[in-house]
Image: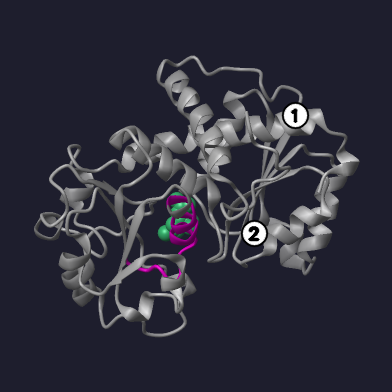
Amino acid sequence: MSYSHSHLLGIEPLSPPEITTILDLANQYADLNRRGGAQDKTLAGLTQINMFFENSTRTLASFELAGVRLGADVMNMSMQASSIKKGETLIDTALTLNAMRPDLLVVRHPQSGAVDLLAQKVNCAVLNAGDGRHEHPTQALLDALTIRRAKGRLHRLSIAICGDIAHSRVARSNILLLGKMENRLRLIGPPTLMPSGIRDFGVEVFEDMQEGLRDVDVVMMLRLQRERMDGGFIPSEREYYHRYGLDAEKLRHAKPDAIVMHPGPMNRGVEIDGEIADDINRSVIQEQVEMGVAVRMAAMDLLARNLRARPREVMA
Ligand code: NCD
């Protein structure tokens, strides 16, 4: 097995064989979860702390379930209610938690780079559960596993990522991962929601959905992330849905067996039509949630193996 890192902070430092290692193990966990047999002791004796400085439904639940299924002692810290509100710095909070000697620290934070900074200050394995608009590695890995299971491969596919690319850590991690695995990436959205310089990542950019979706194998929709917008990026939700919302008419331009994805939470009638989201012949949105638990089990399993193999002092 090749996964030599002490943390999972992003997709950027991972090599294609390392990505494949995580996905292969996650695939085994997915099968085990389906058989109801994943009550395992892989993380027995280890403490996992989930520190979420931003709201989350599926990511937090998924990390918690993954830890419990592998036998870890799992604690959720609600950071809204913590000393952060009293003015404690991120680093002080990290050092306090570190003194409690956790083994795995799962962190979501609204600032890009905050999780990397924290990882330098603690001597346990840190998993990034989303930092600002920077990275969300486990989301990209669960998306990759979902694609691989649906399409039978994870290379030479034509994949469209649509909507609010500029504010999305999901888009960024997916562009990195799917690019490393040699897929053809198309980004579709209004110019106001497209990051500048994005063409340097080897992607094609489209303003028009019909053109961008032509013959793609995978359609990945993104939420309009209003919490990260400081001004008017779109004329109106109605207009946005008309031009960029995925409905049956627009989906007709993709391949007949193209799959539809969305990381959630979804805004039905804004970026996606409710009927498409619920169409079990096209939508793999529920499968994404299912793969999320398996991918997080695999990531924590691999990090725990490295923790056990190395003395804490030499962790980078
Ligand atoms: C995403 C996130 O938090 O970045 N959601 C998730 O993790 N399931 C995407 C989003 O919030 O739109």
**Circle nearer the viewer, 2 or 1:** 1
Does label 2 point to a residue whose CB lies under 8 Å from ligand 1? no
Q: Return the residue at label 1.
A: 46
Describe residue 142's horizontal placement relative to residue 300 as left or right.
Answer: left
Q: Earlier in the sequence, mark 2 or mark 1?
A: 1
Instruction: Name the amino acid, label 1.
Output: Leu
Secondary structure, mark 1, is loop
* Front in this rendered view, residue 71 or 78: 71
Q: CA distance from mark 2 to mark 1?
A: 25 Å
Q: Report x, y in % for residue 134.
A: 56, 64
- Is disc 2 surrounded by few (<14), some (14 to 19) or many (20+) residues within 10 Å? few
* Front in this rendered view, residue 56 or 259: 259
Residue located at (33% from left, 80% from top): 191
Prevailing SS of the magenta stretch: helix
Residue located at (55% from left, 35% from top): 22
Q: Is residue 159 magenta?
A: no
Describe residue 241's horizontal placement relative to residue 226 as left or right.
Answer: left
Secondary structure, mark 2, is helix
Q: Is residue 165 magenta?
A: yes
Instruction: Name the amino acid, label 2.
Output: Gln
Which of the four quarters of the rendered structure image does ligand 1 lie in? bottom left
Describe residue 314's horizontal placement relative to residue 204 as left or right.
Answer: right
Residue located at (41% from left, 65% from top): 202
Total numbered badges shown on the rendered structure: 2
Magenta span of residues: 163-178
Residue located at (71% from left, 31% from top): 304
Q: Report x, y in % for residue 170.
A: 46, 57
Q: Return the residue at label 2.
A: 80
Q: Report x, y in % for residue 16.
A: 53, 43
